[in-house]
Amino acid sequence: MPAGQVGHRNRILFAAGALLGIAVFLLVFGGSSLDVTNDAFCRGGYMEKDIQQHYAGWLFYRESSTTWPLCVADSINAPDGLSVAYTDSIPLAAALLRPMAAALGGTFQYFGWFTLLCYALQGGFGALLCGLFANGLAAPLLGDLLFVTSPVLLERAFRHTSLGAQFLILGVLYYYFKLHREGRYASAGLFVLNLVAIGIHPYFLPMTYAVTLALLLEHGLRTRHWGGPALYLAADLGCTLGLGWCLGLFYGTASSGGQALYGYFSMNLNALWNPVGVNGVCYSRVLPVLNQVNGNYDAFAYLGLGILVALPVALVLDRCRWLRRLREHWALVVVCSILTVFAVTNVITANGATLAPLPLPEVLIRLFSIFRSSGRLFWPVYDLLMLVVFSALARLQGKGSVAAVAVLVAVQIWDISPAMIQRSDAMASAQTQEAFPSALQSDFWEQAQNYRHIASMDGIQDDALHLALFAADNEMTTNDPFAARYSESQLTAQRQELSDELAAGTLREDTLYLFAEEGAFLQAVEPVRGGAWCGRVTSGDGQSCWYVIAPGLQDAAFDSLCVAYDENYPLRLADYTDGLWNRGVLDETKQTVCFADAPFTRRKLEGATALCAGGKEYKITNIDDHDPGWLMVTLEIEDATVLWDQELETKSCRNFM
């Protein structure tokens, strides 16, 4: 086909594919998210809470002072600041749209339009990719439906908004096959896709660059000319790193943090045929939900019934051709194998079992933990498996190819349609914040709006993302580590400085102090209780709580969700669990409980003969303080787990007289 006709066909394919993507987006999600003043689904937490993190990062950045590099929100990780790349707020979009948001004023969210663009580009590049393996327009556009209804895309859209940019993978695969056929290695489109990836989410970089590297290696070995490919790769990498620097990805020391290392978010060996998504969303009408362990849920990679049935048939019927292609695309096979091994990790899991936790040097664990959600790196292989099936069916003679692809797509969409309906219903219900109430329901938070800083003194606060939105709405700074990355060492040093001040009786009047652990609160509160309201604040359902020191509010009275710290403040078991203890109860006998050692706890237990809860008394037979930081109390009780989450009082010997 002449070059002019090829270009014309490609333009039609791209435009038509983009329209398919837009149609699927509107069918599933509707148009409510395209209203930039509608942030209900962001605040409520569509499907799960991650989008609250994305939106909070944007709110913080929008109100931050203009700095260089871009996208650094000085109110996050205060006082150092943090790039909103680490709140998954799509830094490239944030930087480009901040002037528009400032001009318009009021509420402004871009996550709906970004996701619509992702679907459009997924359709455009999917059609181009299918067009490389099928003639005409009908078969490529039918095949494109496999990609615009991809379960992985559907699973990530609005949940991990930036990871909805699956078009980056389809785009680099398209350029890989196109340039490989043409005997070329360089393309402006491929260059730009690698560049844009860092501005959307760094997790795409190892995937897009792996495919790019495969193209360059195959071209270099075939032509015996390495200078051009090396220069192209160096220029692309240089520009990518430059854009990353401009968007603040290398700002400060946000290189640590998080709750898991490499191996936790591994890809289960059942991932390709396990249809379970987040919050129990099922992507199949036929296949059963299978067990997972650890963070396998983040490696979701269900292929769909149509692909699963057709894949082995396609490989067997056309095995000679596939063997030739494996030799021809040897470097792509190598990088895909590496990505797969990295996704599976050294913690090999199948269904609900860990088969083989293979030891790795600590230095490699730390290095690989840069991309600790390792299961995501399987996505290029995932798309290639879909492409393998499509290309096999597209080679059938005459109209048989179109009919075969049509049947494949029909089975595929029929199978995953329950998930599409569930996603649609979730977006519809997410339009009212009442469906996702904030835990910050006490009238205490109305007074708390007057502080300038929120100081998280330990751990990660309960409902940290609603707390982050609260801080952003009220132009407060926060050091609460709600971002995906932060500097653990700086946070520890800052918390120690604040703790030393409290121990010396010094309060920062513009700072609200929050504690996640009651023991840490009880250790800190005594020297400053006269100058602040101190106590426990809970959510309406009791699922979340904060221990607070609120300077200047010592004479305030709050609602029943608040329990002031005074001599009537109740005791609670320490929420401590390890191999021997279960939420503060010694598993071996279930008669010994532990409390965090603090002056208040010692006063309560001094001379006590019994613990009281729910109208019952449990005699104290021993108090042991030999383990620093803990007070262990043995009771006459059959099973002390009944004391979990109970408010406890003590009874002294004079009460018995």
Image (tube, rainbow, N blue to C red):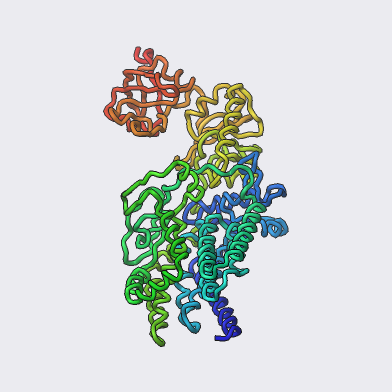
Above or below residue 599? Residue 433 is: below
Observer able to see residue 423? no
Q: Quick check: 85 left or right of 303?
A: right
219 displayed left or right of 310: right
Question: How far across and how far down the image is residue 140, in percent?
Answer: 48, 78
Q: Where is residue 569 drawn, in percent x and y?
A: 47, 26
In this figure, what is the number of numbered marks? 0
Q: Residue drawn 40% across and 24% down?
A: 649
- Name the residue: 39% across, 19% down: 626
Give above or below for 274 relative to 259: below
Question: Which of the 4 image quarters holds residue 92?
Answer: bottom right
Q: Residue at position x 50%, y 51% from top?
A: 371
Q: Residue furthest left?
A: 638
Position of residue 280 measured from the top left corner of the image (x, y, whole percent): 39, 56
Of the 4 image quadrants, the one containing the C terminus is top left
Q: Which quarter of the rendering shows the N terminus?
A: bottom right
Quadrant for residue 237, please give it: bottom right
Q: Nearer the viewer, residue 495 or 654?
A: 495
Q: Is residue 462 left or right of residue 90?
A: left
Please tell me in which quadrant of the rendered image residue 630 appears: top left
Compared to 406, does 381 lie above or below?
above
Residue 591: percent from left, percent from top: 30, 26
43, 585: nearer the viewer: 585
Residue 651 can be seen, yes or no: yes
Along the viewing direction, whichever of 250 and 88 lies nearer the viewer = 250
Residue drawn at 46 percent across, 45 percent down: 364
Query: Seen from this angle, which residue lies furthest bottom?
Result: 398
